[in-house]
Image (cartoon, grey):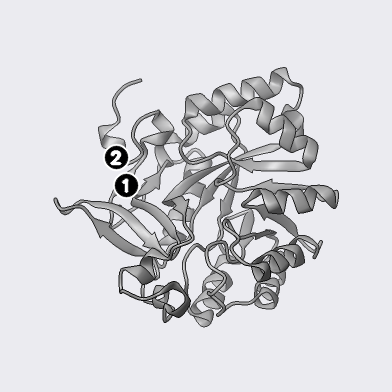
Amino acid sequence: MELTLGPLLYFWPKQKVQEFYKDVTEWPVDRVYLGETVCSKRREIRLDDWLEIAEQLKAAGKTVVLSTMGLLEASSELAMLKRICESCQFTVEANDMAAAQILSEAGVPFTTGPMVNIYNGCSLKEMTDCGLERWVLPLELSSNDLREILQHAEQLGISDRFKTEVFAWGLMPLAASARCFTARSFDLPKDRCGLVCLDYPDGLPVYSQEGERVFTLNGIQTQSGRCLNLLEAVPEMMELGVDALRISPQASGTAEVVAAFHERIQGEKATVADHPGGSCAGYWYGQSGMVPLVDISPR
């Protein structure tokens, strides 16, 4: 089973990004996803910078994938998408159907991210016919849903045509909007946001009136308040035939999380420190997404 590092979902200064991925060259991850997937105004790192980081990771023996935006809102963003898809230097993760279409028409194999809605074996077959070679399970689906999809794929005779990846740790990206909620929270218009996301390297927490962290604002992206933690589900994923587990980068502690998942994949006991927002695992177990692992009821 592979261990992958998902795309950086937050806005960090260029130097911090470069230092982070320099450290990643030494981590036990097999595959690294690079690129801006949330907001095109985050221009501290440009495509050429990402490609330079990609070459460094490739030289360190990592498989590199370029990730595309999850929500396109301007012609300039579509032009950048085409530039990424047509580069042909690295595999591309399509985070919307525009990217999937461009790659399919070019005859280039691709990966789909967790925001692409593949909910059944027929959808998976349609996408593999278009060139999909790897997919990331949508976050709201359970292990039982995955089992049924993979069984259906076997019946359709396509099981050997793709690999399955599961988002296993990190704040879950739940939705994207044309409105920037981080800017809005400071009464700033989206077009003159002042790049306030830089002040929140792990997103801006949102609390209920009862003081419970329910969401995290990340520009136009809304994330879970709790951190998904499927460390204890690794043996079940192996039994299901999951090919890779994804860790989503955070401003601190990511190296320790990667090490814990690596140890668990090797069959060793491992733990990870609780996220400041708390942990959850409900979706995987067919329950409400915010449910922490300790409160998971028997299935």
| Furthest residue in direction left, as rendered | 210
Number of residues whose C-alpha sits closer than 10 Å to that of mark 1, classed few (under 14), some (14–19) or many (20 or more): many
| 194 up-or-down from 69: above or below | below
Q: Residue at x 70, y 54 (%)?
A: 99
Q: Nearer the viewer, residue 223 or 191?
A: 191
Residue 224 seen from this side: yes
- SS assignment at label 2: loop
Q: Are marks 2 and 1 in contact (CB under 8 Å)?
A: yes
- The residue beneath circle 1 is 279
Camera-side residue of 136 and 243: 136
> Could you tell me which secondary element the residue under label 1 belongs to?
strand
**Residue 191 percent coordinates (x, y):** 47, 76
229 left or right of 79?
Answer: left
Residue 47 locus on image (x, y percent): 67, 73
What is the tally of numbered marks visible in this picture?
A: 2
Cα distance between the residues tagged 2 and 1: 6 Å
Q: Quadrant of residue 220?
A: bottom left
Residue 292 tag number: 2
For the view shown, which residue lies furthest in the right direction?
A: 107
Is 193 in front, or is 143? 193
**Residue at (67% x, 68% y) in the render:** 75
Q: Look at the image and tell me in which quarter the N terminus lies.
A: top right
Amino acid under disc 2:
Pro
Judge whether residue 239 can be spotted in this image: no
Identified by mark 1, the residue type is Ser
